[in-house]
Amino acid sequence: MTPVLLCLILGMALVIERIIYLNMATTNVDALLNDIEGKVKNGDYAGAKELCRNTRGPVASIFYQGLDRVEEGLENVEKAVTSYGGVQMARLEANLTWIALFIALAPSFGFLGTVIGMVTAFDDIEKAGDISPTVVAGGMKVALLTTVFGLIVAIILQIFYNYLLTKIESLVSQMEDGSITFMDILIKNKK
């Protein structure tokens, strides 16, 4: 049971960290793009960069990287936005492999407990020289409980894992849509 409990504790710690990170990474992209467009129309690229620097989230970071390369031409801006978008996507997906590992380990440890419980039950039968239900019950109980708890932990972590994937997909979609609109703004307001 201890390994199953550790899977739950470590898995939930990572889930909570990811939920906090992803919620902090959420930005009102439309409002940010409107503010950037206003500044870019007036030629205030420094103000647009400052706005992005002071806005949290991956979208603002991507826009900042693009604005930082405006002087180098739109082709370099697009390369920077694309490259930094990949970096930000990797940050969003951080620790998901560890959560997936705990999802896989919890039932495995549960099944290991099942095997240990069965071995204990057979040892008890051997010691007692009898196959009465009371002799077998203790080992069987351990076997069933570890399996149940292993599966419960995996189900809980799987639900949160899918929530995190959905949240990441939403953020990535915002990043992609926002980047296209951002490039359109720069193209319309070319120096």
Image (spheres, rainbow, N blue to C red):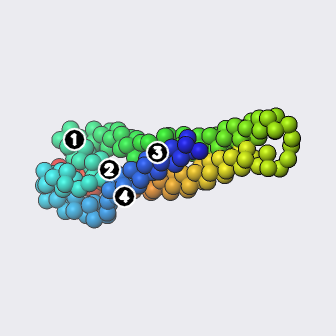
Q: Position of residue 118 (x, y in %)?
A: 75, 40
Q: Which residue is mark 1?
A: 69
- Residue 16: where, in percent of width, then height? 41, 53
Observer-side mark, 3 or 2, equals 3
Marks 1 and 4, how far apart in space? 28 Å
131 or 79: nearer the eye?
131
In front: mark 4 or mark 3?
3
Q: CA distance from mark 3 to mark 2?
A: 26 Å
Of pointers 4 and 2, the one earlier in the residue sequence: 4
Q: Do the CB atoms of the residues marked 4 and 3 lie less than 8 Å apart?
A: no
The reply to whether residue 147 is in sight is no
Residue located at (15% from left, 52% from top): 50
User: Are circles 3 and 2 on residues that touch, CB within 8 Å?
Assistant: no
Q: Which mark is residue 10?
A: 3
Disc nearest the viewer among 4 and 2: 4
Judged by depth in the image, the label closer to the viewer, 2 or 1, is 2
Q: Could you tell me how far apart the alpha carbons at marks 2 and 1 are, in whole angstroms?
A: 17 Å
Q: Residues within 10 Å of mark 1 (few under 14, many from 20)?
A: some
Mark 1–mark 3 contact, CB under 8 Å?
Answer: no
- Examine the rendering and report whether any part of residue 28 can be seen: yes
Circle 2 sits on which residue?
Answer: 58
Classify mark 1: helix, strand or loop. loop
Q: Nearer the viewer, residue 116 or 88?
A: 116
